[in-house]
């Protein structure tokens, strides 16, 4: 089974009211996460992956740099590229109305989701963001993840218009995430939409039967391992895991959350120790994607690993 370790890399400024004041402290937190224990944002993420010899895919949000300057984006992609890891495109349209000159005609208000834009507007936003990222990186990108997993069928046309061949935005845990395509194709296998290969974020049924995304910060290591085993045993071709640049940090701070650090370490150790079963990598060859069967039996995990995650959450709340 192909396993894709993906990371959404983005900068936030504690709301939109004081962007310039907040950016000075938010940028180093989101990019580095300096603390007395080490730098647990991007540097530690890259270090752990490389220590286990695992390739990740880093979806980097570039629109923020149209507000603050290209050098900030270059610093991020240099960290990723120098570590030998792959940079691809992430996009949060919330930045659109903060950028001058405007990228599209209507920037009269903040529109959070890509689905709130016309197909032509989506094409223009993706074109602009892709150019920013490719200029910083010095090479082309070919894969995409939409901010907040919000996309629709028109997004796939906008991606195709921009020469992007892979999308990994669909997350069936989110109602805004192409629900009609999930109904049509299911979300356990890759499928083609308007010439673009869609690799949904993997979702599993937890010990209480609830759907959860395969996200490092949102499930216990036991749940992640059982979801991987369950998908592998069911014969799935691909499994997409999500994390973020700030996922190993405590909320609003630069100190590491060692519960999440340990989960990520254990996940990487497990994948590295089982390379005969899991092929960890990017979204390389999608010429052999079959028309989807529409089947959607999700990977499952047991009660014990879910109970463990809930216990971990209680401990994290107590310690933070
Ligand atoms: Zn994002």
Image (tube, rainbow, N blue to C red):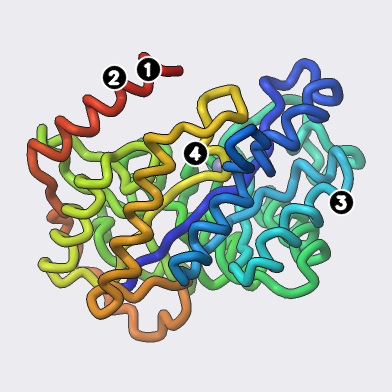
Work out how far the residue at label 3 is from the one at label 4, CA to CA, in angstroms: 24 Å
Work out how far the residue at label 2 is from the one at label 3, CA to CA, in angstroms: 41 Å
- Residue in the picture at 67% in, 21% down: 14
At numbered mark 4, what does the secondary structure look like: helix, strand or loop? loop
Image quadrant in which you'd find residue 46: bottom right
Residue labelled with disc 3: 70
- Residue in the picture at 56% in, 38% down: 246
What is the x, y in percent for residue 256? 52, 33
Residue labelled with disc 2: 314
Ligand 1 within 8 Å, label 3 CB:
no
The mark that comes first in sequence, 3 or 4, is 3
Label 4: few (<14), some (14–19) or many (≥20) C-alpha neighbours in 10 Å: many
Q: Is residue 25 left or right of residue 44?
A: right
Report the image quarter containing ligand 1.
top right
The label shown at residue 317 is 1
Is 151 rendered above or below residue 28?
below
The mark that comes first in sequence, 1 or 3, is 3
What is the x, y in percent for residue 82? 71, 68
Asked if residue 194 shows in the view, the reply is: yes
């Amino acid at each position: 089974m192909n396993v894709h370790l993906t990371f959404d890399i983005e900068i936030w400024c504690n709301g939109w009211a004081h962007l310039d004041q907040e950016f000075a402290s938010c940028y180093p937190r989101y990019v580095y996460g300096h603390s007395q224990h080490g730098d647990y944002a991007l540097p530690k993420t890259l270090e752990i992956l490389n220590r286990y010899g695992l390739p990740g895919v880093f979806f980097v949000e570039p629109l923020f740099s149209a507000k603050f300057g290209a050098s900030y984006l270059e610093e991020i992609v240099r960290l990723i590229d120098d570590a030998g890891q792959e940079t691809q495109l992430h996009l949060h349209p919330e930045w659109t109305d903060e950028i001058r000159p405007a990228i599209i005609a209507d920037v009269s208000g903040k529109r959070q989701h890509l689905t709130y834009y016309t197909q032509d507007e989506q094409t223009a936003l993706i074109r602009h963001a892709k150019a920013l990222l490719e200029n910083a990186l010095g090479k082309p990108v070919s894969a995409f993840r939409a901010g907040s997993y919000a996309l629709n069928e028109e997004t796939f046309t906008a991606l195709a218009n921009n020469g992007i061949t892979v999308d990994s935005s669909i997350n069936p845990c989110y109602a805004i995430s192409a629900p009609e395509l999930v109904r049509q194709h299911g979300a356990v296998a890759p499928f083609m939409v308007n010439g673009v290969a869609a690799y949904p974020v993997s979702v599993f049924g937890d010990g209480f039967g609830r759907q959860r995304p395969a996200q490092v910060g949102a499930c216990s290591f036991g749940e992640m391992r059982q979801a991987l085993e369950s998908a592998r045993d069911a014969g799935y071709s691909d499994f997409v895991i999500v994390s973020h640049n700030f996922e190993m940090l405590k909320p609003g701070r630069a100190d590491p959350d060692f519960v999440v650090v340990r989960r990520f370490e254990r996940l990487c150790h497990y994948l590295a120790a089982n390379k005969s079963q899991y092929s960890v990598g990017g979204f390389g060859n999608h010429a052999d994607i079959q028309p989807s069967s529409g089947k959607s039996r999700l990977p499952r995990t047991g009660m014990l690993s879910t109970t463990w995650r809930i216990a971990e959450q209680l401990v994290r709340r107590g310690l933070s």
